[in-house]
Image (spheres, rainbow, N blue to C red):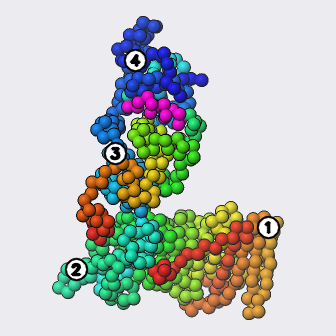
Amino acid sequence: MKPEENVSKSPTTAEAANRKRKNNGNPEGSHARRRLFETACEYSNTPPEFDRFENLRISNDEDFLSQLEESFLLQIFKYLTRTDIHNVMAVCKRLHRASSDPSLDTIKWKGGVTIISRTEKGYGFEHHVKCESYPWKKETTHKYQYEILKIEGGGYEEKKEINGDLEHFPHMSVPNHKWQILENFYAALKNILRRHEATYIQINKIPCGSHLFSRLLSELKDHKIQLLECVDMECDPTSTEKLFFAQLVKKVKNVDMSRSIHATSIINERFLSEVGQSKLQNFSSNLGHQTFFKNRFRPSESLFPHIVHLNSLLAAGMIINVNSVLKLIMMRMDTASISHRHSYGRWYFTTDQELTGEIIAVQMKEREEEYEYSVNETPRNFNHHCIIGKLNGMEAKFLVREIKVDDWNEEEGGSDPILYSIDITFMNTLCYKEEEVPSISQLIEQ
Amino acid sequence: MVLITLVSSDEQNFPVERELLKQSGTIETLIVNMNLDDEDTDAAAMPIPLPNVKGDVLEKVIQWMEHHKGDPVKEGDNEDNNAEIVVPQWDDDFFKPAMYGSKHLELTVAASYLDIKNLLTLSCKAISNTFKGKTGPQIREEWGVPNEFTPEEEEAIRKENEWSE
C-alpha cells in the first residue's frame, strides 16, 4: 500500500488539540489524541535496539549483521543447528559472543550416548558424540570420559579424558562402595550435557539413595531422550528415588530395565499409571525372570486407560484378572487404530487363570461385530489366539503359557502356584511399521 | 471498511484496514487502550504515530500484513518447533531482494517493535537460512563482515571444546 497523498501529517499534541477544539469544540477528543501520541511514543522507547541500530546503520553502511543488537542475533540463531552455531562463532567477535549465549544451550549436538557408572573406586561417565558434523570428531565417535575417585587419607581425585581409556572404566568393573556421588561429578556432567544431547542413556550399578535420578531430572530437562537403559540398578522400595525415577521415565520414549532384575519393585500399578500417559512408548523389563514375578502386583481396571497408549509393555509381574484381559487387549487395539504411532507393539504380562478359547469367546460376544476371533493349535500344544479388527485393521496375536512360581503364598489367594503369561504382538495391518530401538551396546560399537 | 491511519517516522500517512492491524500486538494494544474501536470514537481523526518505523519499511510491513490477512496470530514461542519452521515461497521471494542489506534487518526490527510475531519469526528464519551449511569465512563474505580474528584466535576457536572451556 502506497502512502496516502494530500492527507494531513500526523498532528503534534498541540496541533491536534487546537484542530479538535476548532472543529467540534470537544476537548475530550484532543485529550484522547494526546494520550494516543504519548502512548505511541512510550512504545517507541521499548526497543532500545532500534535507536542503536539506526545509529549503527549510519556509522557503517556495509556490515549490518555483526552490529545488529544481540537480542536480534539471538532471535536469528535460535533457528540454527548446533553445527551452524559453531560456524557462526568463527564469523566475528560479536557473533562469537552472541552465539555463546546460554539461551542457545537448548540447541545441542545431536545423537549422544551417555553412560553413567559406579566404577570400582568411584563414579564416572562417558559421553559418546555420534553427530556426523561434530567438528572435533576424528574417527566414528568422539568420547568424553570423566571419573571421580576417593583417595586414601581423604579427599578425591578427578580424571578427565578425551578419546582416552580411563583405567577402571567403563562398566565392567565390580564396585564395592556406596558412597554418595560428589558435586564435582554433577558439575562435570552438566558441563558436557549443556550442549550435547543425551539421546541414549545407560545407568550402571547405581546404588539406591544416590540421588542420581533427582539430579538427572534437572540436568536433562531440555534433552530429548530416546532410550534409558538401567543395568544392575538397585532400588529400595521405600526410597523417594522411585518417584524421581518415574519422573525421569516420563521424559523418555523407550525404557529398558531388562538388565535390572533387582529393581523390579519399582514397577507397580502406581508407577505405570504415572508413566503411562507421557512420552513413554515402550517399556520393557526382563521376561521370565523369577524376580519379576516375585515383585508382582494386581492392578485394577482403572489402570487400563493409563497404559493403553504404550506400544510395548513388558511387565511380567503385572497380574491381570483373567476376566479383564480381553477388555485390556481390545482397549489397546481401539487406541492403536486411531494412532499411526502404534502400528506395532508387544505386550507381556501375567494372568491368574488360564485364558482359554471359551473365556475369550464369551468376553468377545458384546463386540463380535467389530472384532473376529480365531485360534490355532501349534505342534507343541500351545494355542495361538488371534483377534482381528474388522474395521480398523488392528491385529492381536497372543500365546498363553503356564508359569511356575516358587514363592507363592496363601495370602495372595488360591493354593495353586501357577500363573499364565500372556505374550501379545499387536500390529496395525493398514500401516505396519516396526520401530527398531537400537541398544546402547550397538550404538557404542557403531 | 474501517480504516486507521498509521504515521511513519518520516511523517508519511498510511490508511490501513482495521482488520489487518490485529496482526500487530503493539498497534492492537494502542487501539484497545485508546478505545478506537468504539462507535463513538472518530478513529479516522486519530492517526497512530509510529516514530520508530520509516515510511519505506512501514510500506513493506503493510504489504506483508495484507498478504497474511486472516492468518492465525502466533501465540508465545514454541521452542520445540524452531528447527521445523519453513519460510513459505511467497515470504522467501518477499524477503530475498533485500536480504543481505539493511532493509531486511530494518524490517526485522520493525516486526519486533510492532510485535508482529509471524513476520518476526519468518524474517529471522529467513536470515538464519542464509547461515545454514556455511563456514564462518563464507558467512563473512556473504554478509560483508570484516575478519577481526588473528590466526591464533581462529585456531583457538577451532580447538574449543567442552573440557577446555
Q: Which residue is mark 1?
A: A390
Cα distance, mark 3 to mark 1?
A: 66 Å
> Magenta span has A82?
no
Is B55 magenta? The answer is: yes
Tell which tag, 4 or 1, sits nearer the viewer: 4
Residue segment shown in magenta = B52-65
For residue A156, which numbered disc appears in the image? 2
In contact (CB < 8 Å): disc 2 and disc 3 = no
Report the amino acid beneath label 4.
Pro
* Residue corresponding to mark 3: A63
Task: Tell me the subunit letter for badge 1.
Answer: A
Q: Secondary structure at mark 4?
A: loop
Sequence-wise first label, 3 or 4 = 4
Residue at the spot x=45%, y=57% of the render? B132
What is the chain letter for disc 4?
Answer: A
Specify the amino acid type for callout 2. Answer: Tyr
- The local secondary structure at tag 1 comes to loop
Give the mark toward the camera: 3 or 4. 3
Q: Earlier in the sequence, mark 2 or mark 3?
A: 3
Identify which residue is drawn at 36% across, 18% down.
Answer: A12
Q: Which of the numbered marks, if any, corresponds to residue A11?
A: 4
x and y, in percent, of residue A224 in the image: 47, 65
Image vertical order of residue A353 relative to residue B78, above or below: below
Q: Residue at 44% x, 23% y: name it.
A: B12
